[in-house]
Image (cartoon, helix red, strand yellow):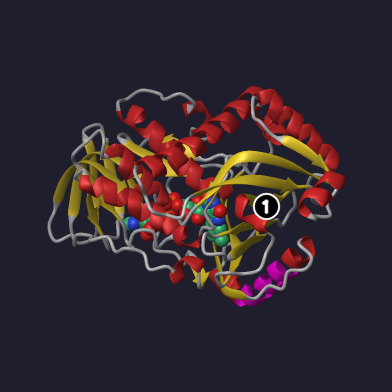
Amino acid sequence: MPAFLELGPRKNLRTGRSVWSAVKHAHLRANRLEKDLKADIVIIGAGISGAFMAHALSRISDDVVVLDRREPGLGSTHASTAMLQFEIDTPLTELAEQRSFSVSRRAWLRSWRATQDLIRLVRREKIACGLGRRDTLYLAGNEMGARGLEKEARARNRAGLDCEFLPGHQLRARYGIDRTGAILSSGAAAADPVALSRGLLRIAMRRGARLYSPVDVKQVMASAHGVVIDAGTHFIQARRLVFCMGYETVKGIPARGVKITSSWAAATAPHAAYPAWLDRTLIWEASKPYLYLRTTPDGRLIAGGEDAELDSPSYRADTLARKARRLKQKTEKLLPGLDIDWSHSWAGAFGESRDGLPIIGPVPDMPNCHAVMGFGGNGTIYAMIAAQMMPTFLRGKHPVDADLFAFR
Ligand SMILES: Cc1cc2nc3c(=O)[nH]c(=O)nc-3n(C[C@H](O)[C@H](O)[C@H](O)COP(=O)(O)OP(=O)(O)OC[C@H]3O[C@@H](n4cnc5c(N)ncnc54)[C@H](O)[C@@H]3O)c2cc1C
């Protein structure tokens, strides 16, 4: 019996002007869907998840088709501040309580390795996306104080992750930040997410992948023989399908404990005045709502956070100015002496899972269909992990760590 899946309608994923709208990104030539198609593998979604997937799958098949209802990279990926952190939103100690130390350790180590692999891949493929290595400072906040962070740092060391707990006096002396403590780690990075996703797609297309946009997929029919994709005006037949649809997640995909919330961000114009060490360091905090900071190669300071448990485009738009003011106040309080003037502010839908881990794997009861749902602040790293696992899934095998990210 074939299984059917209705895909959700187009959502308002972003509000305001993201900092990436200031960058002239190279255009990708997409095809128009003017007839029915056949393909070996179809990927729905050309955001960062679909781009990593196309890059990986175009190595194992010369018949990959990527479909998107928008231009590539103009979904949630355009809202991302693209902090490429191996540190998962859920602290290692907390995830260990939810899912055991062994699971938590494997998830954190996998995230660390994927981050290093991503950095190597971008350099090897020479993708011009402003990628730079960064340390991270995870500051004590209202969710975890110095004692909790010290315990977290010990647990990370025990798991095999290098990091250092900085007590308050050292944090003040080295960074001028007045908090009770922080965890300092190396191994993160930052990039331009739209340039990265288009760079990956361009390589996939050079290997023969075909990009079609705008194509709005309405429904999927899956059976043991393959899948049929209803794109409104035309049908696409494929052997295998990978959903990389971001937060326009399918209603019928049975992911428990997943919710869509909202997140805000703002950026200064280039050449902003800020301490030089910020160019080498990402900042985030153990707080709810949290604040995070990064800079760009042309000297913009980007702040983000202020998350709210509501997925409402009108709320995101109505509160944009207030949230941008709040991000300014918080940043100036954290780094005294700054005088911030935002040139861009924006907000977007933000997906969260209960344990902060993504969902990657075969869709239950949908033969030949796999899904990537990269939740939390690590969507980019999760996209990389999904692309590393998918070739094995498509061979009908279980890749290492499949159990960590399976539908649950
Ligand atoms: C303010 C903010 C800051 C963030 N900061 C970071 C950060 O620092 N680091 C990080 O890693 N992540 C960050 N994120 C999260 C990040 O944006 C997401 O994890 C990531 O962009 C998801 O990528 P995606 O490719 O899965 O989704 P998308 O970029 O949304 O791509 C999915 C694509 O699927 C297409 N699609 C969906 N349904 C259909 C359909 N039925 N037919 C055809 N096409 C379809 C859409 O048009 C879209 O282009 C942030 C998010 C926000 C809002």
* In this view, 364 is above or below 345: above
Quarter residue 27 falls in: bottom left
Q: Main secondary structure of the magenta part?
A: helix
Q: How far from the left and from the top, in percent, is residue 208?
A: 19, 45
Quarter residue 253 falls in: top left
* In this view, 372 is above or below 346: above
Residue 275 shown left or right of residue 227 in the figure: right
**In the rendered picture of this protein, how many numbered marks are placed on residues?**
1
Q: Residue at x 59, y 61 (%)?
A: 262
- Does the image show residue 250? no
* In this view, 116 is above or below 321: above
Q: Residue at x 70, y 23 (%)?
A: 158
Residue sitting nearer the eye, 267 or 53: 267
Residue 180 shown left or right of residue 157 in the figure: right
Residue 16 shown left or right of residue 363 in the figure: right
Q: What residue occupies the far left of the structure in this picture? A: 35
Whether residue 319 is in magenta: the answer is: yes
**Kind of element beneath mark 1:** strand
Q: Residue at x 31, y 44 (%)?
A: 54
Residue placed under numbered mark 1 in the picture: 283
Quadrant containing the N terminus is top left
Residue sitting nearer the eye, 162 or 244: 162
Q: How far from the left and from the top, in percent, is residue 119?
A: 46, 41
Question: Type of residue at label 1?
Answer: Ile
- Does the image show residue 156? yes
Q: State whether label 1 is within 8 Å of ligand 1.
A: no
Whether residue 69 is in magenta: the answer is: no
Q: How far from the left and from the top, in percent, is residue 338?
A: 73, 69
Residue sitting nearer the eye, 232 or 244: 244
* In this view, 67 is above or below 64: below
Q: Which residues are magenta?
A: 318-329
